[in-house]
Image (spheres, rainbow, N blue to C red):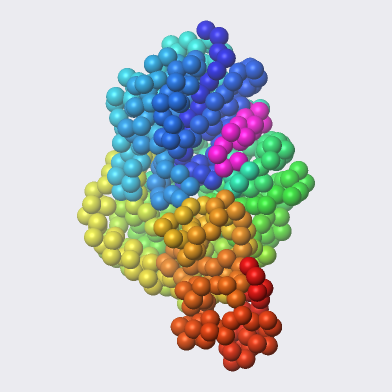
């Protein structure tokens, strides 16, 4: 059968080492498109996100039924709350499969491998009826399966759904040729950020790896060559992408580490990271965001000198507001041992100190250069009520040491097929359901709030905040990058714009901010009262004495030089707006 049209539906993915919920575009759609265009560059690919499908379902079903091949991608292993899009639901996968009667249908991504992760603490939903509606459910690598299917002239019976890539280098052409698919993403030209893979697999495979983690199923690390990564970024950059995250790996610090397969924590390789980051900057000189994601606190603690050097390299070439997400998972030594986790509490604290030492200084966009993020996983083997107290005490110690942490991610384990936790299931989570809720709230109040005030104090000016969504009479916005802080703007601002804001208040995991420059002669009393140090009385006084034609007039009314000096950095005195 000749193929001239393929439809790709991006249902979004969220995994421990990979994010594909808008504004993120992960590797699945890019590599798959690359596999198709490597086979025949004339094949027409229609790319739709699941949100686009929802908005115009009947039209897109018609498009699907005019194609020879349908590829549905996605799945959440670590589901969260999303502002930029809503991942595909099991019933939507079935509905699309049922109504797409003409093409051969492929299901790929985490939902095909593991099932549907609906919420933390529950096994993924594995729906047996999916096989009635899809011809191939990919358990290996979807781009390899698609390539093989095209070579076999769409003979489904010739396909092994478990087939994987030969090695990391083998997907070079797919990554490069598939870059063009970014042009069809709804966030293209706005706040699109591409997730970049550096390697997969884990050095700790030799000790069995963490009890809940699927990364060990890939075996030992298979590093993508520096030249392959850089070439992919160069092509993405040529197509107009300006935001990148090196997020597809379990530990960016261990990229090209020496002694993999011999040691649990192979020696870190600063030279390779220097070459990688400097080369990226050479091919993408005017990029706007270059961030990382995962980092192993055990690797950093075991190789502190090399880790410091790597942190300095990252800060030298990246953009500020970066986050090294630490898989601490637990501060309970019993849980750490029973689940073969990466680091003991003191090692994790040492790793946090090292990153703070290099990355805590504030960058040009208003955020610290590079901070750790902390991941806690609950429901693991050996967990007791004491585990919750130890985790909380661990974070209290972080506060006491005046260390900065960008965010704390608290989740309940989703037991995945092939991991040790699969046999345990959610019985520990069920047992500790109420404790989990209580301690999560404690963590938010005692740690998150004071920590956020340290990381982003009042009067901080955040640059290049992208306005994403209206919520009643307010606007929700975020900077582009790793774990962007949610910015609540208490007025309606034009969407899809980059603006600067000043921080005026804090929630547990968000901030309230006002767009700047503020026109002191036009601003409403409600917004004026939100500015730190102004309050109701000063706001009323300012309103009654407007318009101000000079700073001296404002100075006389306020009677507080400190507030005046701070205001001067965020206001203008124009009589007309």
Q: Where residue 336 sits: x, y (%)? A: 39, 56
Q: Where residue 373 sits: x, y (%)? A: 50, 60
| Frontmost residue, 446 versus 210 | 446
Res 572 visible? no
Where residue 303 sits, quadrant-wise, is bottom right
Q: Where residue 404 sits: x, y (%)? A: 53, 69
The residue sitting at 60% across, 76% down in the picture is 521
The residue sitting at 30% across, 57% down in the picture is 383
Q: 333 above or below 379?
A: below
Q: 67 above or below 274?
A: above
Residue at the top extreme of this rendering = 1
> How many callouts does the rendering have?
0
| Frontmost residue, 565 versus 234 | 565
Where residue 106 sits, quadrant-wise, is top left
The residue sitting at 48% across, 21% down in the picture is 63
Q: Where residue 320 sits: x, y (%)? A: 64, 60
The stretch drawn in magenta includes residue 185: yes
Where residue 177 sits, quadrant-wise, is top right
The stretch drawn in magenta includes residue 426: no
Res 55 visible? yes
Is residue 293 toward the left or the right of residue 16 in the image?
right
Q: Magenta segment, principal secondary structure?
A: helix
Is residue 334 toward the left or the right of residue 369 in the image?
left
The residue sitting at 34% across, 27% down in the picture is 95
Residue range corresponding to the magenta coloring: 174-188
| Quarter of the figure that contains the C terminus | bottom right
Q: 39 above or below 230?
A: above
| Frontmost residue, 379 versus 477 | 477
| Frontmost residue, 401 versus 45 | 45
């Amino acid at each position: 059968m000749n193929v001239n049209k393929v439809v790709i539906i991006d249902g979004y993915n969220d995994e421990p080492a990979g994010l594909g919920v808008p504004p993120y575009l992960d590797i699945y759609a890019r590599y798959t498109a690359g596999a198709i265009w490597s086979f025949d560059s004339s094949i027409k690919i229609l790319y739709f996100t699941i949100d686009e499908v929802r908005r115009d379902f009947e039209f897109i079903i018609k498009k699907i039924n005019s194609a020879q091949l349908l590829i549905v991608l996605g799945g959440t292993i670590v589901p969260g709350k999303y502002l930029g899009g809503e991942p595909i639901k099991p019933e939507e996968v079935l509905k699309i499969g049922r109504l797409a009667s003409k093409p051969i249908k492929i299901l790929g991504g985490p939902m095909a491998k593991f099932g549907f992760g609906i919420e933390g603490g529950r096994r993924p939903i594995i729906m047996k009826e999916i096989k009635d509606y899809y011809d191939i459910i990919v358990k290996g690598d979807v781009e390899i399966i698609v390539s093989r299917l095209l070579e076999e002239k769409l003979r489904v019976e010739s396909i092994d759904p478990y087939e994987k890539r030969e090695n990391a280098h083998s997907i070079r052409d797919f990554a490069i040729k598939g870059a063009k698919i970014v042009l069809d993403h709804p966030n293209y030209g706005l706040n699109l950020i591409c997730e970049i893979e550096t390697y997969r697999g884990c050095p700790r495979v030799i000790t069995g790896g963490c009890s809940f983690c699927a990364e060990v199923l890939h075996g030992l690390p298979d590093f993508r060559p520096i030249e392959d990564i850089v070439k992919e970024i160069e092509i993405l950059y040529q197509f107009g992408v300006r935001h990148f995250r090196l997020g597809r790996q379990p530990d960016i610090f261990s990229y090209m580490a020496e002694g993999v397969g011999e040691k649990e924590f192979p020696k870190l390789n600063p030279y390779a990271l220097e070459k990688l980051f400097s080369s990226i900057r050479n091919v993408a000189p005017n990029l706007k965001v270059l961030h990382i994601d995962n980092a192993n606190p055990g690797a950093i603690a075991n190789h502190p000198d090399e880790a410091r050097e790597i942190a300095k390299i990252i800060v030298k070439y990246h953009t500020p507001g970066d986050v090294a997400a630490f898989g601490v998972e637990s501060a309970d030594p019993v849980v750490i041992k029973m689940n073969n986790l990466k680091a003991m509490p003191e090692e994790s604290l040492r790793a946090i100190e090292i990153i703070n030492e290099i990355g805590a200084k504030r960058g040009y966009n208003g955020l610290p250069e590079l901070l750790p993020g902390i991941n806690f996983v609950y429901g693991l083997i050996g967990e007791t009520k004491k585990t919750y107290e130890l985790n909380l005490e661990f974070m209290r110690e972080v506060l006491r040491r005046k260390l900065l942490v960008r965010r704390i991610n608290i989740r309940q384990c989703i037991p995945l097929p092939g991991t040790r936790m699969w046999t345990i299931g959610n019985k520990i989570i069920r047992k500790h359901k109420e404790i989990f809720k209580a301690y999560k709230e404690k963590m938010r109040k005692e740690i998150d709030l004071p920590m956020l005030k340290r990381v982003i104090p009042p009067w901080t000016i955040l640059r290049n905040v992208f306005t994403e969504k209206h919520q009643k009479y307010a606007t929700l916005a975020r900077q582009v990058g790793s774990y962007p802080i949610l910015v609540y703007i208490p007025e309606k601002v034009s969407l899809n714009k980059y603006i600067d804001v000043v921080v005026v208040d804090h929630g547990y995991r968000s901030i309230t901010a006002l767009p700047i420059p503020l026109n002191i002669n036009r601003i409403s009393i409600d917004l004026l009262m939100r500015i730190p140090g102004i309050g109701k009385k000063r706001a009323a006084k300012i309103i009654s004495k407007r318009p101000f034609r000079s700073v001296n007039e404002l100075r006389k009314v306020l009677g507080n030089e400190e507030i005046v000096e701070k205001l001067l950095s965020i206001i203008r005195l124009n009589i007309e707006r």
